[in-house]
Image (cartoon, rainbow, N blue to C red):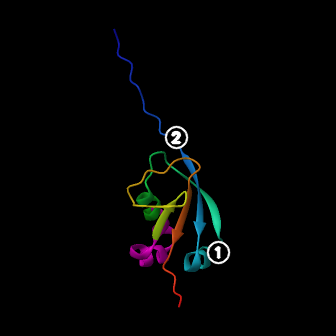
């Protein structure tokens, strides 16, 4: 009897990305939707964005990632429909 191979299919996920401050200025927009491979992490998203926008690499250690209005680390797996905010430090006084 022949064994059937089961292929694990990872669907793509679409996330809404919110840009703030200097990142929004460099991107030229405040929000957009990005499609990622299923199982992608916040860190993998940052890697992809850093390739497209060198300013991300420059500020990466200072950028806070929020998913659905909660801060997360780069190991967080992103889900379809997540709202991702990339937040840079703000100054004030």
Distance, label 1 to label 2, CA atoms, is 29 Å
Please say if 3 is above or below 49: above
Q: Residue at x 39, y 60 (%)?
A: 74
User: Crowdedness of circle 1 by 10 Å Cα count: few (<14), some, many (20+)?
Assistant: few
- Counting from the top left corner in percent of width and height, residue 23 is at 55, 76
Classify mark 1: helix, strand or loop. loop
- Counting from the top left corner in percent of width and height, residue 75 is at 38, 56
Residue situated furthest bottom in the rendering: 93
Q: Quadrant of residue 15?
A: bottom right
| Mark nearer the N terminus (1 vs 2) | 2
- Counting from the top left corner in percent of width and height, residue 90 is at 52, 82
Please say if 9 is above or below 62: above
- Counting from the top left corner in percent of width and height, residue 46 is at 45, 64
Classify mark 2: helix, strand or loop. loop
Please say if 86 is above or below 26: above
Quadrant showing the N terminus:
top left
Q: Residue at x 53, y 91 (%)?
A: 93
65 and 38: which one is in front?
65
Residue with the mark numbered 1? 28
Residue with the mark numbered 2? 11
Q: Is residue 34 inside the magenta stretch?
A: no
Magenta residues, start to end: 48-63
Contact between marks 1 and 2 (CB within 8 A): the answer is no
User: Crowdedness of circle 2 by 10 Å Cα count: few (<14), some, many (20+)?
Assistant: few
């Amino acid at each position: 009897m022949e064994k059937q191979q089961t292929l694990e299919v990872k669907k793509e996920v679409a996330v809404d990305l919110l840009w703030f401050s200097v990142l929004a200025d460099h991107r030229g927009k405040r929000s957009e939707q990005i499609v990622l491979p299923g199982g992608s992490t916040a860190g993998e998203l940052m890697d992809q964005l850093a390739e497209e926008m060198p300013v991300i690499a420059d500020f990466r250690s200072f950028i806070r990632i929020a998913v659905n209005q909660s801060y997360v680390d780069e190991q967080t797996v992103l889900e379809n429909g997540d709202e991702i905010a990339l937040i840079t430090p703000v100054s004030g006084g």
